[in-house]
Image: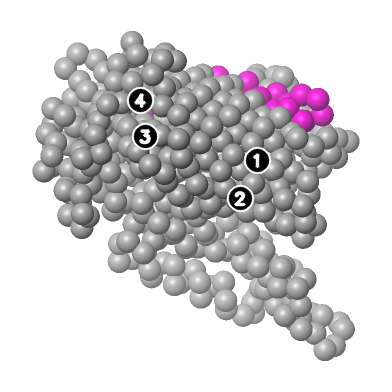
Amino acid sequence: MKPLPLILAALLLALCAPADFAQGGNESRLHSDFRREWLELHPCREQLVKPCSEFTFGHLAGIGQTLVTGQPLHIALGSLAPQNGFAPGLAFVEHKDFASERRLTFDIDAVATTNLSWRAGAYLTTYKLPQSNQTIGVVMGTPTAKAKKPSVQVAPVFNLYAEATSLNRLYFYGLGPNTLQSGQSAFGLTQTITGASAILPLNRDGISFTAEFNGRFPQLRPDTNETAPTIAALYTEATAPGLTRSGAFFQPGLGIQFQPTLFENRIRLHYLANAQYFGAIGAPYSFRRWTADIGQEFALNRKVTLIAANPHNGPDSCASAGTACPHISTTINNEGSITLRLLLTGSAAGAGNAVPFYFDPTTGGSNIDGNPILASYPDYRFRSPNVVLLRGTVEHSLPKLPLGVYFSADAAKSPLTRGDIDFTNLRTSYSVGLTVHAGGLPVVYLLFAWGGNEGTHTTFSISNTLLGGSLRPSLF
């Protein structure tokens, strides 16, 4: 943990230092980008009209956007796993274009929270630059119908990444849908993920294969700083598989996704079927997992097109079309959508093996990736190898404000066996709250949830990817 503050301090000094780079013909792309970013942070440096104040609304808004989206260096903001807090840090983003019309982009970031949890990673993406008639998929931003540019190309997109996450506060209540709150225990987890993934489009109808191959290296540790007992005080290897032995895993996965947009990008479909294998090395924890994720999103305003994460961006980038992120307009658009989702996940271990509990998906509050399911319950409340989720969501911006209103209804459960993956005995939960919009996307959520039989739950979270950035590797 000690090197992390030194890395952040060095990157911060680089961001604030004067841009005394050469401006002649020998200036490199990196020097040019640093010089341009420094000038964006000091808008009066080349202002022809005197006097010039950097404290006008327009200048302050531009400076703020550069601080959180600028390239090659910007402030990284986001939430780590629930109970581990808000994590500020820094991110470095660059790209290189080759004569073969291939682009290489890479991000490096590091963030930390007040409870000393942290995440650091490096992400590399390569793809062929789009031609005018060689794109498929979903629209980015809110362009007009004539100017829309789908985000997935016919050419494949390849990713390499290495990410380490250390979380000091996680909860375990036992396995299955009928555990008790009195079974709460605490533990810590560090997981390093190194791997590669690809999107392999088949045609311009939005159909693509997905592929991944990851190495996962989880390490459990006790948490004795909580009011809840540490996990080993209440559970054993039999009741929490994976508790007494740490293993390394090789994890391949294959899937197919269908992501067309309909009616001038006012309806976006996201259908995914995926199969993964977690092969344990030196421990009896090998298992298989399948996932079916069916989502449909409908725009509530005819003048607004729907926005999706862009697979050409890293998690810290929103500038796939050029060297800078699109300007975040201070004019608030009338944006909103209705989303319907069905998620089914099942897991099976071979003879003599068990699914380690730290790779089990959870329902209740938010899961370890920060995604809420049955948000009125405590975080990580129900844990099992299988999940059933039905969800409806409505989100819409407020007039003349960068805020939105949000409502969702969940019906879900965590069945202990695959034979119980059905739509009976579902728990329900409802959430209402406010979102903060930036670039047409809700990025901050303040939600109040109710409807279960264990009270209410208020959550505050900030997206851990930049506007339009691709998702980070899942921690389970």
Q: How crowded is mark 2: few (under 14 residues within 10 Å), some or many (20 or more)?
A: many
Q: Nearer the viewer, residue 428 or 185?
A: 428
Badge 2 vs badge 1, beta-carbon distance below 8 Å:
yes
Q: Mark 3 points at which residue?
A: 453
| CA distance for labels 2 and 1 | 8 Å
Amino acid of disc 2: Thr
Is residue 119 visible from the viewing direction of this image? yes
Secondary structure beneath label 4: loop
Q: Name the residue under label 4.
A: 414
Percent of width and height locating residue 226: 22, 55
Secondary structure beneath label 3: loop
Mark 3 or 1: in front is 3
Position of 417 with respect to 245 (left or right) is right
Badge 4 vs badge 1, beta-carbon distance below 8 Å:
no
Q: Name the residue under label 2.
A: 435
Q: What are the residue bounds of the magenta stretch? A: 251-270
